[in-house]
Amino acid sequence: GGRVRTTHLRRWKQEGRRWAMLTAYDRFSAEVFDEAGIPVLLVGDSAANVVYGMASTVPVTVDELLPLVRAVSRCAPRALVVADLPFGSYGASPEQGAATATRFLKEGLAHAVKLEGGADMAPTVALLVRLGIPVMAHLGFTPQSEHALGGYRVQGRGDGADRLLADARALQDAGAFAVVLEMVPASVAARVTESLEIPTVGIGAGAGCDAQVLVWQDMAGLGGPGGPRFVKRYADLRTPLLQAARDYATEVAEGTFPGPEHTFSE
Ligand code: KIV
Ligand code: NA
């Protein structure tokens, strides 16, 4: 069939059908994950970390993310492509959010945007939805607020659980089509999931969510061992890539590459 739409995601929740989201930042990640049937691809501001080598998502800019979004949109024929709005590009006012989100659809060819924040962001979500821009929300641990939250910490424990649920409801009421729950106790995420009509997408939020998301380089083991508890490595791409680079360098040094089969004659 054709392109995955936000309407499919809502139907899948009603049907109890769980789905997986992955990040993508370029041609081959988009092509391969689309071919694998991953229905939603996120061009995350995690590009700050995994593409640009920054220590957090805070410094990455719209101009750094836009070309990545455009590449993924071009190369994913079926997936719904969601573009993360980076820190500083939407939080000051709904109008600022509308201007930035519009660029991601118009220049980046994204189908939807994602933004971080709770009930305070509801007016921004409502404006974007009114303008025809589907919005995915992001609650719990929100990396753009790392400095305000005091580092990477589980959110929604104790009194935080009710606040998280109220935030999720406010974002749903504002028209968000899904909500990411990051680093939230599984029981709290399950409660939010049951309370909402729109799907929850968990990362470090347990199996009770409607969907899951991982950063693809984490999922595929490109960064090597270590990393957060919520990551599962389905492959160890770092090892074969390292070996391939070493073998290539060795053969060049030895003079065994290029061989006759890689060489043109007169
Ligand atoms: O930027 C990102 O990759 C994300 C997901 C991990 C949810 O926001
Ligand atoms: Na993000």
Image (spheres, rainbow, N blue to C red):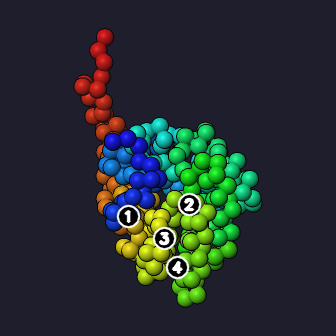
> What is the crowding at mark 3: few (fewer than 14 residues within 10 Å), some, or many (at least 20)?
some
In the drawing, does residue 248 fall left or right of residue 56? left
Answer with mark 1 or mark 2, whichever residue precedes in sequence.
Answer: 1
Residue underneath mark 1: 14
Residue that appears at 29% across and 15% down: 265
Q: CA distance from mark 2 to mark 4?
A: 23 Å
Q: Label 3 amino acid?
A: Leu
What element does badge 4 sit on? loop
Q: Earlier in the sequence, mark 1 or mark 3?
A: 1
Determine whether 145 is above or below 100 in the image.
below
The answer to whether residue 238 is left or right of residue 176 is: left
Of badges 3 and 4, nearer the viewer stands: 3
Contact between labelled residues 4 and 2, with CB atoms less than 8 Å apart: no
Q: Nearer the viewer, residue 226 or 14?
A: 14
Q: Position of residue 60 (x, y in %)?
A: 63, 54
Q: Earlier in the sequence, mark 2 or mark 3?
A: 2
Question: Dividing the picture into quarters, in which one does residue 151 lie?
Answer: bottom right
| Disc assigned to residue 154 | 4
- The answer to whether residue 224 is seen in the rendering is no
Mark sitting on residue 196: 3
Q: Which mark is residue 176?
A: 2
Picture quadrant of residue 90: bottom right
